[in-house]
Image (spheres, rainbow, N blue to C red):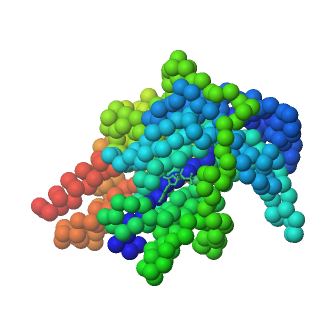
Amino acid sequence: MNSNYEAVIGLEVHAQLLTKSKIFCSCSTEFGSLPNTNVCPICLGHPGVLPVLNLHALEFIIRMGLATGCSVNTQSIFARKNYFYPDLPKGYQISQFEKPVCENGYIEIEENKNIRIKRIHLEEDAGKLIHEHGNVSLVDVNRCGVPLIEIVSEPDIHSSKDAVTYLTKLRQILIYLGICDGNMEEGSLRCDANISVRQKGEVALGTRTEVKNMNSFKNVEAAIKHEINRQIGIIEEGNKVVQETLLWNAELNESISMRGKEQAHDYRYFPEPDLEPMIISDEWKQQIKSTIPELPDEKKKRFCSEYKLPKYDAEILTSSRELANYYEKVVQVTQNYKAASNWIMSDVLKIINERKIAINEFSISAENLGRLINLITGNKINGKIAKKVFELMLLENKTPEDIVQEKKLLQITDTCAIENIVEDIIQKSPEQVEDYLAGKEKIIGYFVGKVMAVTKGKANPQIVNEILIKKLNKKRHI
Ligand code: ADP
Ligand code: MG
Ligand code: ZN
């Protein structure tokens, strides 16, 4: 990016709420049902029907507001946003304009770096057009009336990287709160990016464009980068950026103009006459607040202080509530907090990612992993053998102790026995002994390897090293 410019980005994120039924009727919200089966006169927009608010949806948005430091308005109203589109049978979307449920919050993306949230409002989703059938387009209205919250940030973001961090944090909070599954591919989380650029030091905002249709973090990052560079190019050529809505095409790594920017007045917003104002009492707010779990940032801080973990570890371990719970169960069994973290971050996550499973589906219980670590710290097995035991635990549901006993993997710590083996190897390796004495200290690895081969990897490496050095150095003085 040309360093004379600064990018300014504000994100509008739509999150589908995890309610069982739709926002104004009792139809199911299930994803992937047969087209046009989860419908009724209300979500089909038949004349004369009346919407009834699903209180779970309201509760969920309040949770999100409280979790992001928003003020939750005591009174809030719905508005009709009027426009015509084939996926919108009613001809209007019930949304919020004035008096959204939540206002003025923030998300901390790094220490001392907050992105302000302007508002979070409640609305219904529209249907879906399917263009995969040659010259005809089909409409599936199952999604009509599925509850969404829209989280609108202030234009506080200045790079594609920070946009992705913001989105990652936002998604994590939604999932921690249990109000959205965060699945971008299925469209449960959608992001539109408003982007402008200005000369460094300039205070006024430049003309923005809005990029839609980015269904992965990778796309968000690529689309924003592309748009920043496109706008700088236009300005550098002496032209002006046109305010418009763009569609991101991930395959071509390009954006396409979709339409000129619509303005709020184009929608003829007016207060929804069929729904009463939402009244949110302090009492209800308090009650909802008490159900909010420990959030990712708090958890991360606690993991650092309670388990003395580096920030890096804490960040990974708290990336989901389930993973954090798994870790905390492991450290109920072992006091070796850092070892537990290392095992999870490398060995456990590797398997989980390979198999594309969730931590809850991982076959080694937290307790057994804790026991395995205790076998190492208790000098019952060494680190290499532990990896082997771990592999065996993946195959069958047995305690590490049983596996160690069955496969005779107990560590050899008997110094006499190790001394005899070492002595024998030294006898048989005169060349290597000479090398060692000539200053090639790395050759010690050769001897260790031999001892491990004889003991099938079971010798205590520390004892082996000590004895080897002692015996080899003795040769020096003869
Ligand atoms: P609209 O009603 O057109 O969607 P809003 O004022 O609600 O516009 O803003 C939508 C989003 O665009 C917000 O996230 C806001 O931060 C962002 N935004 C507004 N102006 C700019 C700008 N000039 N450059 C970048 N982002 C902007
Ligand atoms: Mg907008
Ligand atoms: Zn319905």
Q: Nearer the viewer, residue 468 or 391?
A: 391
Identity of the residue drawn at 20% across and 53% down: 470
Provide residue 210's location: percent of width, then percent of height. Answer: 57, 61
Please say if 366 is above or below 90.
Answer: above
Q: Is residue 187 left or right of residue 162?
A: right
Tell me the quarter of the image containing the N terminus.
bottom left
Residue 388 appears at what percent x and percent y? 51, 48
Residue at 80% over, 45% down:
90
Which percent across, then down, holds residue 356? 63, 51
Where residue 2 sits, quadrant-wise, is bottom left
428 displayed left or right of 246: left
| Residue 117 appears in the rendering | yes
Q: Residue at x 53, y 47 (%)?
A: 152
Q: Is residue 326 above or below residue 130?
A: above
Vertical position of residue 277 compared to residue 385: above or below: above
The foreground one among 88 and 295 is 88
- Can you name the residue that lies furthest to the top here? 283
User: In the depicted view, which residue is nearer to us: 227 or 360?
Assistant: 227
Which quarter of the figure has residue 310? Answer: top left
Q: Residue furthest bottom?
A: 237
Residue 355 visible at all: no
Q: For the C terminus, which image quadrant? A: bottom left
401 vs 274, nearest the viewer: 274
Count how many numbered circles sit on residues in the image: 0
Instruction: Determine whether, in the image, residue 53 is placed left or right of residue 325.
Output: right
Residue 6, image x, y percentages: 38, 65
